[in-house]
Image (cartoon, grey):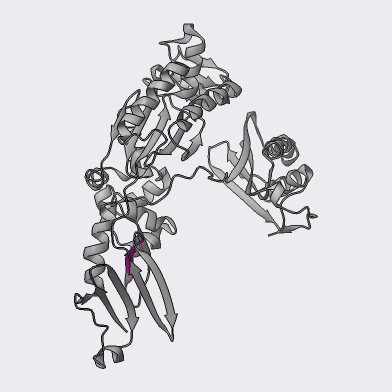
Amino acid sequence: MFIEAIVTHRCLCVGFQSPAWIKGGKRPHHPDTRYVSFYETMTKLCHRRAAAGFGVVCGRGVERPWIISISLLCSVFVRHGSLWFLMTALNPTPLRKIIHVDMDAFYASVEQRDNPELRGKPLAVGGAAARGVVAAASYEARAYGIHSAMPSVTAARKCPQLIFVKPRFEVYRAVSQQIRDIFAQYTALIEPLSLDEAYLDVTENLKDMPIATQIALDIRAQIKRLTGLNASAGISYNKFLAKMASDLNKPNGQAVITPQQGPAFVAGLAVNKFHGVGPATAQKMFGLGIKTGADLKAQSVQFLTQHFGKSGPYFYGIARGYDGRAVRPDRPRKSIGAEDTFLQDIGALPPAIRELAPLAEKVWRSCQEKGIHGKTVTVKIKYSDFTKSTRSRTATHPFAHCDEVVQAASDLLATVYPFKRAIRLLGVTLSSLSDRSHDAPQQQLGLDL
């Protein structure tokens, strides 16, 4: 097979064809056409455009993977075993202006705002009991190394004067809505990630403000006036870099990463600092000799896909400062879950199932309130040595009754009994969610293993 690219002023044609096409000597003619190799064209054109913030799509060619810019309008033709791409509109896609707004120590800051006696003191939102967990920590507490998800006993050991406050989620949700209303004054393209952070696309904004940096300053000032709370912001040309930028000048600050700065910023960043690279993935990268963004950029998309699956192309992109994900106001919720840490470890199945049932019921109520249901139930188990395991099962249709969720979760828990160690925590999650109003009522027929 022969691979060739034909580049004109406004059109790029790439085709896979047999050598007979070349031997015949009949190439498509254009007065301004020059003939270059496929790999040369893709390397010089598309890698350069990807580094500038344009999209890449990865796939398999005949002899080697190929990359094309998705900022081109592509038409694909398959005929008689030949694959052709007709790509037009080589003009660059406009860069986006993305802001990531992140509230500073949100839960703890709300508590300090509402109770002046807590201001300036190390504070943890969460349970103080032996099995409690820190949900949020004030900056005064963070100075002692305390962070969210830390066991309360560990936090108290690090800071004996630490003050624990029970969370008030109804208050946090109300404040979060106030903040979201401020966002809506500037753009309809708002993607909330949680109660305390969101992405905003302000490329075309409601106030016709040309400078995203000024929009971020205005939003943060309004949040301070309305709620008394501090927010930090990151501004860049994609979501990944905006998220990274919002951490650079915390608390109560903001930072910008421009298209010119993006690739170099990523190159010097340790991979364990990348948003979206968790501890396990970071350790795997370290084992492969990938320690920085520059190391990641040196890997081929085939290599990254081989070792990281579907995340491979994403890592390939962000290593070059590219992230093509759009800000999605209608981002569907993927799952709803609940979990509980027990005061005493549980070693027998019957009491474990008794603790599991109220978690499943809580998840079911939450789904009912939101008008959704799901067909995949997952049970999370954390043992006394803090090791974890999960078990999942997907039903043929969405669960129709709470009892079905409870039964499915109980059956899953039974598959790991006898437990290898006593259980410290249990969780139940429902996923594969869908809108109840869009699904016709149907009888639950059973479970697919």
Q: Residue furthest right?
A: 443
Q: What residue lies at 75% left-to-right and 36% top-to-bottom?
A: 354
Q: What residue lies at 49% left-to-right and 37% top-to-bottom?
A: 193
Q: What residue lies at 44% left-to-right and 23% top-to-bottom?
A: 105
Q: Where in the figure is residue 287, as x and y percent of width and height?
A: 33, 52
Q: The N terminus lies in which quarter of the figure? A: bottom left
147 over 419 or under it: above or below: above
Task: Determine the main secondary structure of the stretch shown in magenta.
Answer: strand
6 over 334 or under it: above or below: below
Q: The C terminus lies in which quarter of the figure? A: bottom right
Q: Where in the figure is residue 32, as x and y percent of width and height?
A: 19, 75
Q: Which residues are magenta?
A: 66-70
Q: Residue furthest top?
A: 117
Circle count: 0
Q: Where in the figure is residue 279, as x and y percent of width and height?
A: 41, 43
Whether residue 388 appears in this view of the structure is yes
Q: What residue lies at 39% left-to-right and 26% top-to-bottom?
A: 219
57 or 183, which is in the foreground? 183
Whether residue 421 appears in this view of the structure is no
